[in-house]
Amino acid sequence: MQLAGEIENWVNANRDYILDNISGLVRINTVNMPPGGNEKPGQEYIYDIVSSYLPAEDIDLFEIDDVEGIRQNPYFFPTIDGVEKIYKNRPNLVARLKGSGQKKSLAFSGHIDTMPDYGKKWTVFEDPYSGNIKDGKLYGRGSVDMKAGTLAGFIALKCIKELKIKLKGDVFAESVVDEENGGVNGTIAARLRNPDIDFAIVPEISNLAAGIETFGGTDWKIDVSEKGVGGIGADVDLENPIYKLSKIALALEKYDTYIKSFKVPEAFNDEFKIKLLTYQFYSGGSNYLESGAVPTEGHIYFWLEAYSYMDEESYRKDFLDFMHKELGKYKEFQEKFPVIENVIRFLYGHKTDTNHPAMNSIRKAYKNLGIEYIEKGIPYGTDAFAFKKVSNTDVVVLGPSGANPHGIDEYVDIDSVFQLIKIMVLTAADYCL
């Protein structure tokens, strides 16, 4: 309890420092815009912060292709929508606070990349990268997804060092690239770089609940095309891809209903059922001036969620069998079936070993801080699955509160960030002893 009080005092004394650095990071555009990304300025910003309290030899700034053999790893996924990804000048950043050399190591692992702002004006603060604060909320693209959580890990290292907490195991803080858009190759690189870290906390938005299970899923694309040049069909009967797309959309709606019958894992409430979300239905343009002819092609993009117990191969077969059965009722699909393919990798759901010793340390941290402890499933996809797939590291999702990730007026709750830092430090102090 004495240590909890010391950590509380440290966080209170450093409130302005913490907020200034989070705001500064949010103001830096680190958008993941495939096939590349703009993460490097954010990584350099964090590097400057960390280098003020850790020696250079304990800060690892490396690119994905610096990791030997990564492109041969079965979980490395090099493309998005068929386009080769570019990883030059998109470094990962890993800082290590050394213990006395014995085991039981811990990592705080977050991603620096964000989704775009899509050119939309925000309402609370017009600038999507303001980093401004109002009513206890810090606004900006990436504030809760997940710059505040990512930086919290590095600040936790600073707190441990300045309070001279003696640890036997090493504590790492990571800022990885390319998590958004189903990337995860930055996480895979970090795992292969340090494969034997015992446990990790991924500080994605969880409202300070311990996310012991997550959803998975993948983005899909269905393409349809017709012969000919299109037009207005003055003397010919033109095939219309829009009618095909409409039938496909109805089949997707049926599959969305069908997967609601799948068993919901115990970590989730029954209302958290996986979904099929159709994102884009496109053919023939997007406004009247583009609508003067029957189109010849079109597509649908959609996201299909999965539970952690579901594997890619069997789920893919189930979905494709369903679509063949539904669309096979129509003559036009019997003659020419649409192209159905993945746009990104399959993101597996993850499941934490709740008996792992690090989980006991997390529970103790909550108790010592007087915070209600909740374990539950988190109904979205993350990079957490990669920890167990390519390394020996177990993982839990545990991050701050906030709202609107990927949307307008994204924000992180400031008090939850302070609580998160305290949880991180106390967990490390107990687990790495």
Image (cartoon, helix red, strand yellow):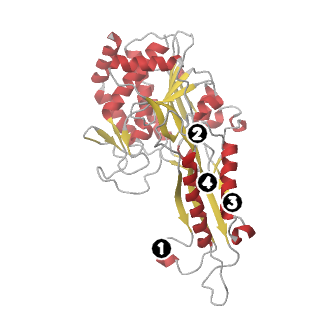
Cα–Cα gap, marks 2 and 4: 17 Å
Residue depicted at 36% across the width and 18% down the height: 367
Task: Locate residue 65: give its quadrant.
Answer: top right
- Residue 176 visible in the picture: no
Q: Is residue 365 left or right of residue 260?
A: left
Q: Which SS class for mark 3?
A: helix
Disc 2: which residue = 184
Q: Is residue 102 left or right of residue 48?
A: right
Task: Locate residue 232: give its quadrant.
Answer: bottom right
Cα–Cα gap, marks 3 and 1: 34 Å
Q: Earlier in the sequence, mark 4 or mark 3?
A: 4
Q: Callout 4: 10 Å neighbours few (<14), some, many (20+)?
A: many
Cα–Cα gap, marks 4 and 1: 25 Å
Percent coordinates x, y for residue 178 in the rendering: 55, 42
Percent coordinates x, y for residue 36 in the rendering: 57, 48
- Residue type at mark 3? Lys
Disc 1: which residue = 287
- Residue type at mark 4? Trp
CB-based contact (under 8 Å), mark 4 and mark 3: no
Q: Which SS class for mark 1?
A: loop
Percent coordinates x, y for residue 41 in the rendering: 47, 40
Q: Nearer the viewer, mark 2 or mark 4?
A: 4
Residue 74 is labelled as none
Q: Is residue 287 left or right of residue 225?
A: left
Disc 4: which residue = 220
Q: Earlier in the sequence, mark 2 or mark 3?
A: 2
- Residue type at mark 2? Val
Q: Earlier in the sequence, mark 2 or mark 4?
A: 2
Disc 3: which residue = 325
Q: Earlier in the sequence, mark 4 or mark 1?
A: 4
